[in-house]
Structures are given as structure tokens and as C-alpha cells.
């Protein structure tokens, strides 16, 4: 709006002052005028918010409204008139040093997940690059830590560096490149602590020894673990960081962000694999990425009352749609109960994921992200907004819901992740 | 042992400087848009802001406005504020 000629002051809560300042600088306007009230605004009464306004700016200590009014009317100085133009570079290689010093450097710069890493020497990176036919300087994608951040670009070689750090083997590299090619960060800075989940399908699963059986979602496979960790590390480093208070604002954090990538158990599933549902051939190797992981629920069965159990789980939260992760035993039991395709289960979930309008709309993210669309008349949200408080709202469309079959059949276990599907990318394209 | 290792970071974009908009000497008689950024409870905050101006700086006319969607640039809203207003307060950004 400053570019439109409108003098502005942006009001933030104080815990975001570093990210607000940094974002302004990286937009070329480091002197953008900002004012800071206490956190939180959510849940505060009108009187409490009025006290914020009549109180002190939480960063400068001066009266908040003085900051606002001066921000709109204070004459411009040289820095205000020029902004900041600069280029940042990242070298290909770091200065040679002792291994222990370099390990410390990586930790100090927050280039690790604070677990030990494999140092990305020239030899190791060269070996990783042999895992693909793609040239090292080929651009793979662009990633950013959040909606308001700048996108950073990365090449095949930069992805290889992070794959080495994670302990991955060269044969895993096409999967890691495909994850990077989604441009979906698993380290986004959201206050909700969202992360990404990767699901691998096709022949590559067996070629590189991925685990689709017992403990597939846990630390029980070198391939699953290091591919997932590589996705996490590359997201952090290739997007320009994931630093609390600057590029990461997740209130609680998320243990899934360390590593979560697994293979679908296509052979033991009665249903179509997910990459085929998303338009690939069964013989293709592909990775599908989902963003979310804010909540996980679980169950066993399906038992006789499974519909009631599933309805309770579906009603537990309103914003992120369910991603069902079923052991093959569960999938086959569903099939024996007449659910012969994933789509039938998805349709049942869409039909039965319901909440009273009062409960549905009393959700921070529905208020922030969905309500404006409803007010603007976008369906189906507009109709949901017209509902009376006790009216029952159907929360999701079938297209929002996904089902993956994985597990080792030691138990009829299932989990429900809150997660949105992002995209499916060919692994074969990165061999 | 001395080793040479790769830098693990991606390539950041160039940052191009932008200037701030010219400021009025005073807000007296000016129109200030209160832009509700649609975060939860921002509308309540902006209503309190409106009431503060009414009580303490009645010579300033405030107008409430919202973008079409959260986190999406609304060029039409920006154009309206630029055409009809003299300044804007945006909030409450997390």
C-alpha cells in the first residue's frame, strides 16, 4: 500500500516483532512503520483491546497510539526514501576447517535439526549426485518459510548437500529430489506448527528398501527415516532458515517435522494406491505430499460401532480435513463390510463429518481463512455461514479427504491425520 | 582432519528497495482507513481503534475496510484506499 502512495502503519503483536521487522527489510522497506500491541489479540474482550490501544507499544515503550500517529505523519528521511537494495549470496563451498569446527558451525548457524549430521564434503555430495541423471545446476524449485516470506531457489546440487547431511544414500536421491520439486516446505513458519508428510508409491519403494510394513511411520527403516529427514533439512536450509522468532513461529512445534515419509503398502491393500488416484500409472514411482499434521487420532477395527467412532473423530476439528492412514487389516475389514474402494470410504467420511454451525464457525482458522470467503459468497462456505447455530454443517468435500494404506498387519490400527493434499510428483523424472 | 564442505543453503532473491509514501504533516481533516486483516478478533481491535479516534482525534475520519480474502493481496481494496483515503492502519497482523 506504501507503493500505492498510501502512508501506512502495520500493527502486530509483540511476539512477532522480529519476523515483522525482518520481513519488511526483505521486502526492501526496512523503515516500514510498525507498532506493537501485546499478544494475544485472539480471545481478548473489547475492553482489553482498548487497553492495548491506550497502553504502551510493546517494543518501543512509547504510547502505542503515539507510534501509530507519528508513523503516519512523521516526515520521511533518506532511509525512508531509498529503502534497501541488496543482494545476498550463499557460497558453493565453505572455508576448509577441522570437522569438529564445521559441525559446530552447522549447529551455530541452525543448519541442522540438532541431531548429528553427516558433513557434506565434496566427495559425499559428488557421490549423492550419482543417484540422479539430472545436472547439478538444474533448478529444482523455490521454497519459502511462509506466505509473507521471499522464495529461495535451489538446484540439484543444493538438494544433494542436504540429502548427505540427513544420512541418505544416493539411491534414495530421486525421491528426495521429487520431494524438493514439490516446492512445499515441511518447515513452514506457521503458528500452528504444521509440517508435511510424504507418501511414496510405485516400484521405487522396493528398489530402495522403503518400509510399508511394521513401524513404517516410525524410525524403523533407513530409507524412510533419512528421506524424511532430508526433506525436513532441505526445507529448512533451502528456504533460508527455520529459526524460532524469525522464520518459524509454531507455538508448540511438531515432532513430525523431524522426519515423516513412508511407502504405501500397495501389495496388501485391497484398494487403488494413492498415486493412481492422483493420476499416475501404477507402474510409475511417485511421491505425494500432504501438509498438516496438527492433530492425530487413532482407532482399531473397524468394530461394530465404527461409524460412531469415526464420526467422533471427524467432528474433533473443523479446519484441516482428515487423511486416513489404515493398516491393511483395517482396509480389508472395510472391504468386507462393503466398502470396496477408497472413494467409498472418502464419500462416507465427507457425508458424516458434521458439526453444528455454532461449533463449526467457532474455530480460529475458519474465522480467519474461511469466513472471508463465505462473506464474499464463495460456495460451499457461503451456505454454511447462512446456517442457524443448531443447523448441522457438512464440513468437507470428498476431494478434501485422502486415504493411504500402510502398516505391518500386527494390529487392525488406523490413524487420522489432519492434512491437506498438496501434490503428487514423479520420482521417475528425477532418476 | 581438515575438510571442505558445501554450504547447505539455497539461493536468496535480490532485494529491491522501495520508498515509503509521502506523509501528511498532520492527520487533521484526513481520512484514515482501518484495514482489518481478518485475523481472528482483528475486527474487534479495529472497532476499538475507531472509537479511540472518535474520542481523542475527532478531526480524523476513520473508515473500516477489509480485504476480500485473508493473506491474499486485494488490489481493488488497495486502489480504493489510495483513491479515497489519506492513510491506513493495518492490523492486527500476527
Image: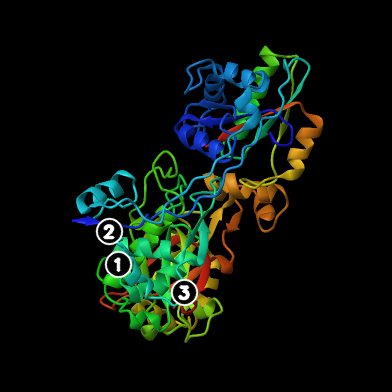
C-alpha span from label 1 to label 2? 8 Å
Q: How many marks?
A: 3
Q: Residues within 10 Å of mark 3 (few under 14, many from 20)?
A: some
Residue A109 location in percent, x, y? 34, 45
Residue A393 location in percent, x, y? 59, 57
Of A393 and A244, which appears nearest the observer? Answer: A244
Quarter occupied by residue A50: top right
Residue B82 falls left or right of residue A117: right
Q: Is residue A90 visible?
A: yes
Of A44 and A252, which appears nearest the observer? Answer: A252
Residue A171 location in percent, x, y? 34, 76
Disc marking residue A124: 1
Q: Chain of mark 2?
A: A
Name of the residue lying farthest toward the top: B56
Where does label 2 land, which residue? A119
Q: Name the element at disc 1.
A: helix
Where does label 3 land, which residue? A134
Of B56 and A178, which appears nearest the observer? Answer: A178
Q: Residue at x 76, y 34 (%)?
A: B81
Quarter occupied by residue A70: top right
Name of the residue lying farthest toward the left: B1
Q: Is residue A413 visible?
A: no
Q: Chain of mark 3?
A: A
Which of the two labelled residues, at mark 1 and mark 3, occupies the earlier sequence position? 1
Q: Are marks 1 and 2 in contact (CB under 8 Å)?
A: yes
Amino acid at each position: 500500500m506504501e507503493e500505492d502512495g498510501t502512508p501506512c502503519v502495520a500493527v502486530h503483536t509483540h511476539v512477532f516483532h522480529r519476523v515483522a521487522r525482518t520481513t519488511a527489510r526483505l521486502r526492501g522497506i526496512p523503515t516500514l512503520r510498525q507498532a506493537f500491541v501485546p499478544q494475544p489479540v485472539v480471545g481478548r474482550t473489547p475492553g482489553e483491546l482498548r487497553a492495548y490501544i491506550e497502553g504502551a507499544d510493546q517494543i518501543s515503550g512509547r504510547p502505542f497510539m503515539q507510534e501509530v500517529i507519528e508513523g503516519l505523519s512523521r516526515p520521511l528521511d533518506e532511509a525512508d526514501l531509498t529503502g534497501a537494495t541488496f543482494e545476498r549470496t550463499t557460497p558453493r563451498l565453505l572455508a576448509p576447517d577441522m570437522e569438529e569446527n564445521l559441525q559446530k558451525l552447522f549447529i551455530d548457524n541452525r543448519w541442522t535439526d540438532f541431531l548429528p549430521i553427516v558433513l557434506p564434503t565434496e566427495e559425499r555430495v559428488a557421490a549423492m549426485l550419482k543417484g540422479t541423471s539430472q545436472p547439478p545446476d538444474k533448478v529444482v524449485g523455490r521454497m519459502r518459510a511462509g506466505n509473507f516470506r521471499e522464495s529461495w531457489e535451489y538446484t540439484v546440487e543444493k538438494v544433494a548437500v542436504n540429502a548427505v547431511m540427513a544420512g541418505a544414500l544416493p539411491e534414495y536421491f530421486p525421491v528426495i529430489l521429487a520431494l524438493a520439486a514439490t516446492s512445499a516446505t515441511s518447515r513452514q513458519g506457521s503458528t500452528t506448527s504444521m509440517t508435511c508428510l510424504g507418501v511414496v508409491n510405485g516400484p521405487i519403494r522396493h528398489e530402495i528398501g522403503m518400509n510399508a510394513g511394521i513401524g513404517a511411520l516410525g524410525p524403523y527403516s533407513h530409507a524412510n527415516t533419512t528421506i524424511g529427514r532430508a526433506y525436513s533439512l532441505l526445507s529448512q536450509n533451502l528456504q533460508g532458515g527455520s529459526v524460532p522468532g524469525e522464520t518459524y513461529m509454531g507455538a508448540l512445534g511438531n515432532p513430525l517435522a523431524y522426519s515423516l515419509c513412508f511407502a504405501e503398502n500397495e501389495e496388501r491393500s485391497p484398494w487403488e494406491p494413492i498415486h493412481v488416484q492422483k493420476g499416475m500409472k501404477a507402474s510409475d514411482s511417485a511421491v505425494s505430499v500432504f501438509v498438516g499434521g496438527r492433530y492425530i487420532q487413532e482407532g482399531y477395527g473397524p468394530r461394530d460401532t465404527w461409524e460412531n467412532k469415526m464420526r467422533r473423530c471427524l467432528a474433533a476439528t473443523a479446519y484441516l480435513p482428515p487423511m486416513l492412514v489404515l493398516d491393511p487389516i483395517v482396509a480389508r475389514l472395510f472391504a468386507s463390510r462393503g466398502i470396496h474402494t477408497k472413494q467409498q470410504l472418502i464419500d462416507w467420511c465427507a457425508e458424516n463429518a458434521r458439526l453444528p454451525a455454532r461449533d463449526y464457525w467457532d474455530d480460529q482458522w475458519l474465522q480467519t481463512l474461511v469466513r472471508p470467503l463465505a462473506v464474499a459468497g464463495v460456495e460451499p462456505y457461503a451456505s454454511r455461514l447462512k446456517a442457524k447455530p443448531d443447523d448441522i454443517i457438512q464440513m468437507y468435500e470428498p476431494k478434501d479427504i485422502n486415504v493411504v494404506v500402510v502398516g505391518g498387519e500386527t494390529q487392525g490400527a488406523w490413524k487420522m491425520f489432519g492434512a491437506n493434499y498438496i501434490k503428487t510428483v514423479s520420482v521417475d523424472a528425477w532418476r | 582432519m581438515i575438510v571442505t564442505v558445501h554450504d547447505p543453503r539455497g539461493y536468496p532473491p535480490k532485494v529491491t528497495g522501495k520508498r515509503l509514501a509521502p506523509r501528511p504533516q498532520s492527520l487533521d481533516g484526513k481520512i484514515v482507513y482501518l484495514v482489518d486483516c481478518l485475523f481472528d478478533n482483528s475486527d474487534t481491535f479495529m472497532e476499538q481503534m475507531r472509537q479511540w479516534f472518535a474520542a481523542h482525534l475527532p478531526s480524523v475520519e476513520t473508515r473500516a475496510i477489509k480485504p476480500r480474502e485473508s493473506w491474499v493481496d486485494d488490489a481493488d481494496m488497495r486502489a480504493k484506499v489510495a483513491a479515497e483515503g489519506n492513510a491506513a492502519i493495518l492490523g492486527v497482523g500476527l
